[in-house]
Amino acid sequence: MVALLPLLAFAIFSALSTLHSYRASSETRLRDTARALAAAVDAQLGTYVAALQVLATSRRLDGDLDAQGFAARSRGVGELFDGWVVLLGPPPDHRVLSLSNQPDQTSLPTELPPENRQAVASLLTEVFEHGRPGISDLFEGAVIQRSILTAMVPVIRDGMPRRALALSFEPAALRLLLMRQGLPPGTFAAIADSQLRILAHSFDPEGRRVGVRAPEWVSTAIAGKQHGLVVGPGWSGQDNVYAVERLRLVPGWTVTVAEPLAVQQALAWAALRWLLAGGAALGLGLTVVVWASRREAVQDARAEAEALRIGRAEVERLHGGLPAIIFLRELTPDGKKPLLYRAGDFETVTGWPAATFADVESSQPWGDLSKDDYDAFFERVVREGTGSVEFRFANLMAHGVI
C-alpha cells in the first residue's frame, strides 16, 4: 500500500489542478463569447451606419431638396432595419427635412423636438462638428413615446457636413440578436449603453428590462476597463461571473456575458468527480494487480519451498541407498568443523545399525574414532582438494559410543 502513496499524492494534485484549469477554461469561454458577441453587435450597428453612408451619397440630397422623393427613396432602408430614416438640417434648429415613415412630407416639424435634441446632443455635435458617424444612447422618442436608439451620419457636401441622416430603431433588433446566440444553459448576455441602461437581455424576450439601469457596483467594477472579468450579484440574487467587453463602434457601450458562479462551480466539481472516479478505478485496478502479484509471489515461494523439500528428500533417499557414508562439514576460521549434512548406508558400511551413529557427533568427536590424524586429513583436503582417513569403528565400544 505504501507504493500507492505517490499515486494518491498525484491524484490530489491532479484534482486541484483540474479545478483551477476548469475554472480558467470557463472564464476563457465567457471572455471568448463576450468578444464574439461584441463583434456581432458591432457588425449589426455597422450595417446601420453603412446603409446611411450610402444613402448620404444620393443625388437627391444635392442642391434643392426633393423631400417627397427622398422620403420614398429612404423608406426601403428604414423598413429593412425595422426603423425609419430622418433627414436633419444643420444647427442650431436641426429642422426635420424628411421622414421616411410619413407619407406627407409637407407637415413635418419645423425643428427637432427639444426632448430628442437633448437626448442626441452629443451625437449631433459629433456629426456636425467632427464629421463622424455615431450611435446614440437609449432615449424616449418624443413622437412614438417608446425607447429608441439612433444611428447618425453626416451628409458631406463640399467637404463639410451640410445635413445629417439618422436611422432610428427600437432595441428589439439587438434583443433578437442575443436570442439567436444559443448560449449554454445558465449563461446569459446583455447589452448596455454608456449610462449602463439595459438595451437587450437574453433572459428578457419581452423587453421588460429595457431602460433599467445596472446596479451601482457594476459601473464601479468596470470603470476604465475595455474588457475583463467581474464577480458580483445578479437580479436573481446569486453571484455571477461576468465577462465584459466594450464595443469598437460605440466605445461607451458594453456587452456582458455572465454565468452563475454556482453553475461554474457545479460544472467544475462534475468534471472533478469524473476525474476522481477514473482515479479510483485506476487505483482499485492497481491494488488488485499488487494483491494478485503478492499472492502469486507467495504461492510461487511456497511451491519452490515444497519443490526443494521434495528434492532434498529424494536426494537423501538416493544417498541412503549408496554403499557409503556422506558427510558435509564446514571449516571455520577457528578450526571447528560443524556437521552440515550426513547420509548413506551406515549399517552396510560399518556393520553397526544406523541409530548407533545418531548421537556420535554430540557425544564423541569423529576424530577420536579415526586411525590417522583427523585434523591433518582436513588440512590436506583443503590444501590438495582430496584426501583419505581410516576410521576404526571397532573402537566404538572402547570409546563408549555404544
Image (tube, rainbow, N blue to C red):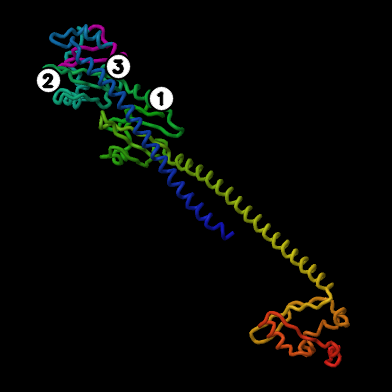
Above/below status of 303 relative to 202: below
Q: Distance between the residues labelled 2 and 1?
A: 40 Å
Residue 77 colored magenta?
yes
What's the amino acid at mark 1? Arg
Q: Mark 1 sits on what residue?
A: 180
Secondary structure beneath label 3? strand
Q: Which residue is drawn at 61% across and 50% down?
A: 285
Mark toward the viewer: 3 or 1: 1
What's the amino acid at mark 3? Gly
Residue 268 location (% of width, % of height): 47, 43
Q: Which residue is drawn at 51% across and 42% down?
A: 270
The residue range painted magenta reads 76-104
Q: Which mark is residue 160?
A: 2
Pointers 2 and 1 in contact (CB under 8 A)? no
The mark that comes first in sequence, 2 or 1, is: 2
Secondary structure beneath label 1? loop
> Which residue is the extreme one toward the bottom?
398
Front residue of this view, candidates 77 and 217: 77
Q: Distance between the residues labelled 3 and 1?
A: 20 Å
Numbered circles on residues, count: 3
